[in-house]
């Protein structure tokens, strides 16, 4: 499980799937990981633009509790750059997804310029001219070793974690704090049940251990997978151009509903 504590979910997924990795999955798991780390968070705002219209609930993304101390990796900045300009900005959820898509540089650019350059992945991929030109992603012997470690850890967690969540929530929380956003890569996991670890259990864990759980846990990290998919598909269909210049000039996108 140690290997999963060192890699972000996007890095893990790239090692697992190499050339078959989908850009949408890389961006989605990066976004959800940032929610889990509390670098960003979502908030819902009830608005009624016109008196004759029914009030609607809008989902916004804002800087999270750990924003000021969080040190983003290069592939995470695609979502965080607006908040680096102003940590008080509010951006509509779907516009943040578009911003990430626009800033990613496409699959090849995101993988080769933002992921493969990570210090965690140096020496893991072959970097020949032919491979780069055709965007063939192949593992080196070092990468193959990491792949085996990842698969072994994931298989163990997929087998054991469901029972742990039901029988030992404290241990389940410790695992979550260790592997962070890689939790999203596990198959057949009941996230409705896993989210129950948050909040009350987090406080109990801190009380019993006298420890600071750090920058992980809590919040809405597991609730936006479907919303992300639909927003990404919309951004991809229209080239990510919402007419809002990445939403940076729309007053925090409050007027881009």
Image (cartoon, rainbow, N blue to C red):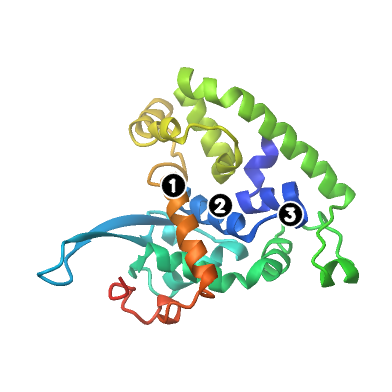
Q: CA distance from mark 2 to mark 3?
A: 16 Å
Which residue has dot 2 on it?
A: 29
Q: Secondary structure at mark 3?
A: helix
Q: CA distance from mark 1 to mark 3?
A: 25 Å
Q: Along the line of sight, which residue is nearer the eye, 125 or 20?
A: 20
Q: Position of residue 63 (x, y in %)?
A: 38, 61
Residue at position x 83%, y 69% in the image: 134
Q: CA distance from mark 2 to mark 1?
A: 10 Å
Q: For the view shown, which residue lies furthest in the top direction? A: 167
Residue at position x 54%, y 68% in the image: 236
Q: Secondary structure at mark 1?
A: loop
Which residue has dot 3 on it?
A: 20
Q: Along the line of sight, which residue is nearer the eye, 55 or 74?
A: 55
Residue 180 visible? The answer is: yes
Which residue has dot 1 on it?
A: 221
Compared across the picture, whether 209 is left or right of 88 comes to right
Mark 1 vs mark 3: which is more N-terminal? 3
């Amino acid at each position: 499980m140690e290997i999963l504590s060192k890699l972000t979910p996007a890095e893990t997924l790239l090692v697992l799937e190499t050339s078959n990795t989908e850009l949408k999955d890389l961006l989605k798991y990066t976004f959800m990981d940032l929610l889990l780390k509390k670098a960003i968070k979502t908030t819902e705002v009830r608005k009624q633009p016109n008196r004759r219209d029914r009030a609607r609930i809008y989902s916004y993304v804002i800087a999270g509790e750990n924003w000021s101390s969080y040190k983003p990796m290069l592939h995470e900045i695609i979502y965080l750059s607006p908040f680096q300009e102003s940590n008080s900005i509010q951006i509509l959820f779907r516009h943040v997804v578009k911003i990430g898509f626009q800033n990613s540089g496409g699959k090849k650019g995101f993988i080769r310029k933002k992921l493969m350059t990570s210090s965690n992945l140096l020496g893991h991929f072959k970097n020949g001219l032919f491979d780069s030109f055709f965007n063939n992603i192949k593992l080196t012997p070092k990468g193959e070793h990491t792949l085996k470690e990842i698969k072994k850890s994931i298989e163990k967690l997929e087998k054991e974690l469901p029972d742990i969540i039901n029988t030992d929530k404290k241990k389940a929380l410790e695992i979550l704090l260790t592997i962070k956003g890689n939790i999203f890569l596990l198959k057949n996991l009941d996230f409705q049940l896993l989210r129950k670890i948050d909040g009350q259990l987090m406080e109990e864990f801190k009380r019993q251990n006298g420890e600071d759980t750090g920058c992980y846990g809590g919040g809405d990290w597991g609730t936006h997978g479907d919303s992300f998919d639909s927003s990404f598909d919309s951004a991809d269909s229209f080239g990510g151009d919402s007419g809002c210049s990445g939403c940076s000039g729309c007053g925090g996108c409050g007027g881009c509903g």
